[in-house]
Structures are given as C-alpha cells and as structure tokens.
Amino acid sequence: MSDESRRDDNASGERRRRAGGSTRAVHSGERDHQSTNAVTTPIYQTSTFWFENSAELRALQEGRGNRDEYGRYSNPTWRAVERKLCELEGAEEAVLFASGMCAATTLFFALLPKGSHLVITSDCYRRTRQFIDQYLVKLDVETTEIEPAENNQLENALRDNTSLFFTESPTNPFLRVTDVEEATKIAHARGVKVVIDSTFSTPLCHRPLERGADYVIHSATKYLGGHNDLLAGVVLGSADAIKPIREAVGMLGGIIDPHSAYLLLRGLKTLALRMEKHNQNGLQVARWLENHAAVKSVCYPGLESHPDFAIASRVMQGCGGVVTFDVEADFDGTCRFVDACRIPYIAASLGGVESLIEMPALISYWDLKPEQRAELGIPDSLVRLSCGIEDADDLIADLEQALESI
Ligand SMILES: *Cc1c(COP(=O)(O)O)cnc(C)c1O
C-alpha cells in the first residue's frame, strides 16, 4: 500500500484522501511483495500472512492453494531451512523447532499413544530422560532402558505395545554408535518405529534415514547452527511420517522464530567446511590424548580402542569434534585442568566454531549424588571437549600445558 489508504485508491473521480500519520506508519510500503532477487533468503519476521480477499482464504480452507496462513504453522524463512535440511539428510519433509528438546518432546507427544512402551538407551541426553520420567509417565508410557549400540538387547526389550525405539548415535557422552540398519530390521519386524538423535554426527557424517530409520532428530543448536549463537531443533522423515509431527507443533507451538531460522540457514551454508575441520580436530586431539600419561581413557569412535570403531568406520564419514576423556585426577584436580585450558570456553553445548569444555559431573549430572553418578558411569574425572575449528596444534598445545595443572 502506498501513501493513500486502500479505500481511497478505489474511489473513482474523487480527490484521494491522504491517510494520517498513524495509518501511514503502519501500512506504507508493506504490501509490495515483489521479488527482489536478493541472494540471501529474507527473514520473514511476521506473525501472520494476509489474504487478497475472502475467496483466497476460502480456497486455503478447502484445501486448495498452498500458502502461509499463520506464523505458528509456517514461515518462508523456515521453509528454506527445512528444504536445505531435507536435501542434506535425504528426507522428504522436515519440521523446525525452538530447540532440540522441543523437537524430541513434540515427537514423543505426537507418536506415543497412552499406555504404550518406549525403548531408550542408558547413555542419553539427560533432559530427554527426565522428560520421559516426569511427563511420559502421565500418559502411562512405560520405558525400557538398554545399553547403547547393543542391538541384541533391543530385540529382548521389544513388547507387543512398543511404539518407538529412541537412541542417539553417537550417544552423549560416551559416543556409542548404533548399527542403524540392524536396529531398524529388528524394530520393524515388530512394527516399532526407530528414531535416531543424530545431533553428534550431522547429515554429513551419518544419514540414518538412508539406513532405514523412520525419524532423525537434531539439536540444530549444535553443529547445524554451528556458531554458538542460536537454539533450534529439527525432526526429519518421510512425508507420511512427518505429518503428525507438523500437526503437533502447530498445536504445542514450539516453533523456531524467523530470525533464528535465518541464522541457521546461514550457518548451514558452511556445514561441510566446518565438519571437515571438526572431524580432523576431533581425531587428532583424541589420538594425542590417548598417548598422554595423565589421561586414563579416551572415548572417540574414530579410535581403534572405541567399542564401536568397526561400525563407525563402516557407516560414518568422520566422527565429529566431541572427545570424551577421563583424566588421572580427583574432582578438584579435574577442575584445575579445565580451568587451566586457555582456548576452550567452560560451557555446556557442543558443535560450534569455538571449542567448549565441560565436566559432565559438574554440569549435566550435578544434581546426582556421587554414587548415582558412578552408577551411570559418570566419574568426577570425566571431561567432554567439543573441538571447534581452531588449529589442532594450538588445541593440543593448550591441553598439554593444562594437563600439567592436575
Ligand atoms: C543439546 C542436545 C539436545 C537438546 O537440544 P537443545 O537444542 O539444547 O534443546 C538433545 N540431544 C542431544 C544429543 C543434544 O546434544
């Protein structure tokens, strides 16, 4: 709409009335939606989408026409991100969320009938397990925990009312890698759907949908965004599989905002370059740590010492930047080591260009008693390092000087 109000535009013959300052402030320049040939996708910072006339709205209600209606259902900026993620992951459809947790919880709400059964792994993002214990019980959903990457345990855990098998691959923090093809065969034989949280690998290192999984989810906060500057999540799968997820997010409302969607779109353009560096840095740092006297053990699927080295070598193209290791120290000694690191920030999260370091006992598992942590296999001396895209030599030199502080 230009400077005149629309009604006056249509008034024939009469001298056009000039709209007031308030009307002009709201409407001027806004309805010119011509294509601009901008190289980057605009941030459609809008909560709703207008209709030319009632017939256009009616057409949408009758299932004719394919356009945006309201900001909780779709947005063109999200759509660009969803298409890009589909192409990367080999999926037909994708749904974006406000966070990785929102992607997981919405998926559970959408797919688990009351009184159904869920199989998850013991090594698993802490909040996912808490959601299961605190909220899914209200739907009388029962859960069986199995060891990660142990498909024989999966077979035994399945029941007649099992709906889903949910696992990270690689898992957090021990980086266990599931043989998705085998797990899917076992699950599908019993009519059970398979969901892989692929946050730690990204579609450039592992594509579970191509190996038969029904759903892939990511915390896009991590590698996909890649710059430690946004929170987002995504669920991907076939068009049929995604339909109930899209309906659920429209109701539960955990959508990504257009600005974060734009940041994610921008971050994704350099995913391949970043992953190459994360993969190299992760492997180099893991190999170096493994030979250091002050390091008890190192978990990295690209090391021959890792229990899933064989499957990781077969199905993954690079194992990412996260290295989990156990140092020869008590709690305080481990803190001294972490504090002495100069390059990585002490922070939760992973997958960004900046290296981050954390002690699981001090971050995700702090509320547990030491005995409970021990039961979960989380020693006080465990450290999780997310290698960023700095120079590997600098990271190694930094770790070397910091390990002297133990
Ligand atoms: C971070 C993370 C989540 C949660 O994602 P948010 O974006 O922080 O909500 C879920 N699963 C894994 C494996 C994660 O690393």
Image (tube, helix red, strand yellow):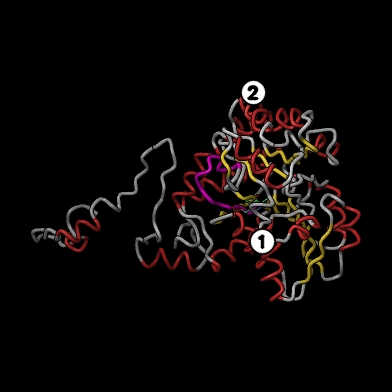
Residue 390 appears at what percent x and percent y? 58, 29
- Residue type pointed to by label 1: Asp
Instruction: Specify the label residue 393 is tagged with.
Output: 2
Figure label count = 2
Q: Residue at x 84, y 33 (%)?
A: 304
**Residue 313 pos. (x, y %):** 81, 34
Residue 84 on image: x %, y %:
57, 43
Residue 145 against residue 140 in the figure, above or below: above
Residue positioned 54% across, 65% down in the render: 250
Question: On the rendered image, what quadrant is the N terminus found in?
Answer: bottom left
Badge 2: how crowded within 10 Å, few (<14), some, or many (20+)?
A: few
Is 188 left or right of 223, judged from the image as shown?
right
Position of 405 with respect to 51 (left or right) is right
The quadrant of the image that shows the C terminus is top right
- For the residue pair 390 and 230, the one nearer the viewer reads as 390
Q: Nearer the viewer, residue 54 or 177?
A: 177
356 up-or-down from 237: above or below: above
Name the amino acid type tagged 2: Asp
Q: Residue furthest left?
A: 15
Q: Which residues are magenta?
A: 223-236
Q: Nearer the viewer, residue 49 or 344?
A: 344
Nearest to N terminus: mark 1 or mark 2 = 1
Circle on res. 367: 1
